[in-house]
Amino acid sequence: MPTAHPVCRVSELTPGARKLIEIGGRSIGVFRLSDGRYFALRNRCPHRGAPLCEGRTMGLVTADKPYQLLRQREGEILRCPWHGWEFDVTTGRSVFMPEEVRVKSYPVDVQLSPETTVEKFNVTEAEGMVVLWTD
Amino acid sequence: MNPEKSASVSGAAAPRIRVVDADVHHNIRDKSDLYPYLTNVERARLEEYGMPRNSSLYQANGGWKGARADTFDAGEDVDPRSNFAMFQTKLLDACGIDLAILQVESTPSIVALADVDYSAALLRAINDWSLEHWVARDSRYRLALTIPMHDPAMAVKEIERLGGHPAVIAAYVVCGSPRLYGKREFDPVYAACVDHGLSLSLHFSNEGFGMNPPMTSAGFPSYYAETYLVRPQFYQAHLSSFLFEGTFEKFPKLKVIFCESGFGWVPSFRWRADMAWKELRSQTPWVKRLPSEYIEENVRFTTQPFEESEPPGAVDEIVGWMNGAKTLLYSSDFPHWDFDPPETIPARFGPQVRRQILAENALASYPKLAGLAGV
């Protein structure tokens, strides 16, 4: 049964920011990307147990051929603060072995609180609540 | 399928290849052996100054003058490496070698010469001489072509000149080099190798000689035993370069044979390379796969000198960790003193793995030998 966990007001999580929360003793990082999308990852690197969500975000660096460096999807790759393993914030999958190495990812959405939905004309997204879902 | 049966069905007359020796060192007997292959200018220089030598740094080797002491059949003053008949009896016949890959002894000292034109001329001569005086006289020989790797354009020329010869199955390169071999300036050499169906056979030598960097980055060892021990670092440096410069992405068909480097270090290198790649992937994103996968696909290791582990069975684990059943090629290093006969490959590996290490892996690692597989 999916359970909703309120994280914070939308206004408290600006684009590009993140917030660490704890649910049931588990540390989780909630990310709001610069384009407004929300994602959440467990704050524990599967490599050595580092606080993954305290790492820096960066772009995805790829190459079609040797010596080429292409950088795209800025801000969507999270690098573990310890050994630099890269994870896709949007999926929790590692960049280097997406099938084998992943971190738990949680769905996040924005819900408007009951009192604001009553008077629809006054509602703005900023007053909504960022909600994380667990199974 | 029964191999003998399949051979008879196909009508192939070739006998089954049971032992391939991937590292054998022949040599000229005298500088005059090369005169017929040189211009009069080059010949005059060789007559006057003799063959280049790079042995003065250590003035020592093992065995007797670096060779098995029981190979001086033609007398004390005749280099056993130059004794064609002795090779036939004491290596090919005595050890049941079906194919032996020749890597001429004099190559390193020639490659270390500063004058690339003279160096390339001597290498051309020694290749021509090897084909005429060794390969043409016994069908069991194949040649790893010496190339002047210090000048990639000239190396390509030599591959284009002789790479099409059916008995030329590899390009022979030594580890001592001013530049690591993954550097892109060497790419034309690898393209030429692939075009001509040659593998790249890499053998230690020349480290610290000529214009090359010191034998170790921490300085020069004093004794020959030390030089024996530090060899894996040369291979590790070149292998790191191949992997992270993307050589095997650019040349996925290229096989690189690491000769006489030992192999006990390979599993730990694979683990560390994979670790480094996972942590630093974004700096070399053209390296698409785990380094260990490229190593398993593109790199082979010759067995001599075989690891003497303690306890003896410990080496079996190492062979397993590096998938040696696929990546190891038997070599004798004849007639050098630290020679390994085929029996060095332990019977406890079982008949199938022994067959692979003694022959089948080699047939799969040199494109021009592929036709001999399975007969």
Image (spheres, coloured by chain):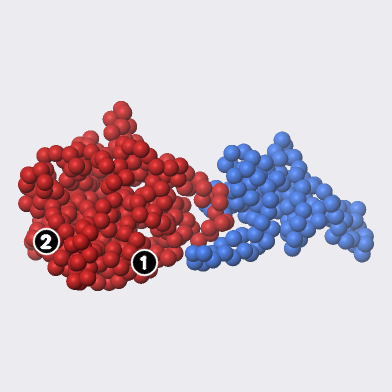
For disc 1, the chain is B
Residue B374, x across and y down, in percent:
18, 56
Lower position in the chain sequence, tag 2 or tag 1? 2
| Discs 2 and 1 lie in a common subunit | yes
Q: Would you place residue B319 above or below residue B87 in this image? A: above
Task: Classify mark 2: helix, strand or loop.
Answer: helix
Residue at 42% x, 57% y is B179
Query: B346 and A133: which one is in front?
Result: B346
Side of B264 relative to B240 (left or right): left
Disc number placed over residue B351 in the picture, else none = none
Q: Colour of chain B?
A: red
Q: Colour of chain A?
A: blue
Q: Which residue is mark 1?
A: B152
Query: B188 and B15: which one is in front?
Result: B188
Q: Which residue is mark 2?
A: B133
Query: B328 and B302: which one is in front?
Result: B302
Residue B223, x across and y down, in percent:
33, 37
Marks 2/1 in contact by CB < 8 Å: the verdict is no
Query: B342 and A44: which one is in front?
Result: B342
Q: Disc 2 residue type?
A: His
Residue at 45% x, 45% y is B217
What's the distance in space between the residues labelled 2 and 1, CA to CA? 27 Å
Task: Classify mark 1: helix, strand or loop.
Answer: helix
Residue A63, x across and y down, in percent:
54, 64
Q: Quadrant of residue B307?
A: top left
Query: Number of callouts in the render?
Result: 2
**Label 1 Cα neighbours within 10 Å, binned few <14 / some 14-19 / many ≥20:** some
